[in-house]
Image: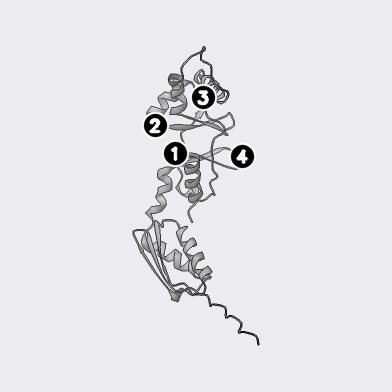
Amino acid sequence: MKTVKDVMSTLPVWVSETASFREIAARLRECRVSAFPVLDAHGKVTGVVSEADLLIKEAVPDEPNVVWGLLAGIVHHAARAKAGGVTAADLMTSPAVTIGPDETVEHAARLMHDRKVKRLPVVDQAGRLVGIISRSDVLAIFDRTDAEIREEIMSQVITGRSEPSWYSVIVKDGVVTLEGTPETAAIGRDLVRRVRHVQGVVAVRDRLVYPVPPVPSRPGPYF
């Protein structure tokens, strides 16, 4: 199973906490990315600065006479404070959403989806930047061939949990068709669940014939 370190970029672009607004804007354009991790003097990730953070300077109105509600006022005050920032430390969103190099690519994808971010700084146990993983890096797991996917399903998913000769596994364009008769319905459902999590699998067509549990007999009448 591929981990983050297998697909991440090992030459991440970053800015220091002291980088100026103008420097950040220029590097965003130069590198054609939408965000940078921000590092302190020890190389640790302290936040992320993005295009959205820079745009606040133009987007947040300066309206001192407006009366805001409590929650809206707190949000607006925070936005105005960021709009007045001039360095990465002032502008960044902190803490950063990060991930470790030994986490699975699946976990990285879930984290990106849940936190609505396009890339994750990859950090070691000390919090130092070691790479960047992006959405396009995550999608690289779908480059696996159908033969590789089928081999993993047969050797690592089915073998050891059931009898491989009882199953037919067909993989085409990442779509797995699983046929056969498992010993129990529980084993069948477990196999289907595990196949769905094999890297590179796009979808699973469950064609298993599940055993029907016996109907308990009713006791006869007593006389």
Q: Which label was assigned to residue 118?
A: 1
Tell me the amino acid under the disc marked 1.
Answer: Lys
Q: Which residue is mark 2?
A: 31
Mark 4 or mark 3, earlier in chain: 3
Q: State how far apart marks 4 and 3 are (Cα).
A: 24 Å
State whether residue 214 is above or below residue 108.
Answer: below
Q: State how far apart marks 2 and 3 are (Cα).
A: 19 Å
Q: Secondary structure at mark 1?
A: loop
Tell me the amino acid under the disc marked 3.
Answer: Leu
Q: Which residue is mark 3?
A: 91
Nearer to me, 41 or 54: 54
Disc 4 crowd, CA 10 A, few/some/many (<14, 14-19, 20+): few
Task: Tell whether label 1 touches label 2 (CB within 8 Å).
Answer: no
At 46% from the left edge and 23% from the top edge, which residue is drawn? 56
Tell me the amino acid under the disc marked 4.
Answer: Ala
Q: State how far apart marks 1 and 3 are (Cα).
A: 18 Å
**x, y percentage for residue 12?**
47, 37
Mark 1 or mark 3, earlier in chain: 3
Q: Secondary structure at mark 2?
A: helix
Mark 2 or mark 1, earlier in chain: 2
Q: Which of the image's four quarters has the C terminus?
A: bottom right
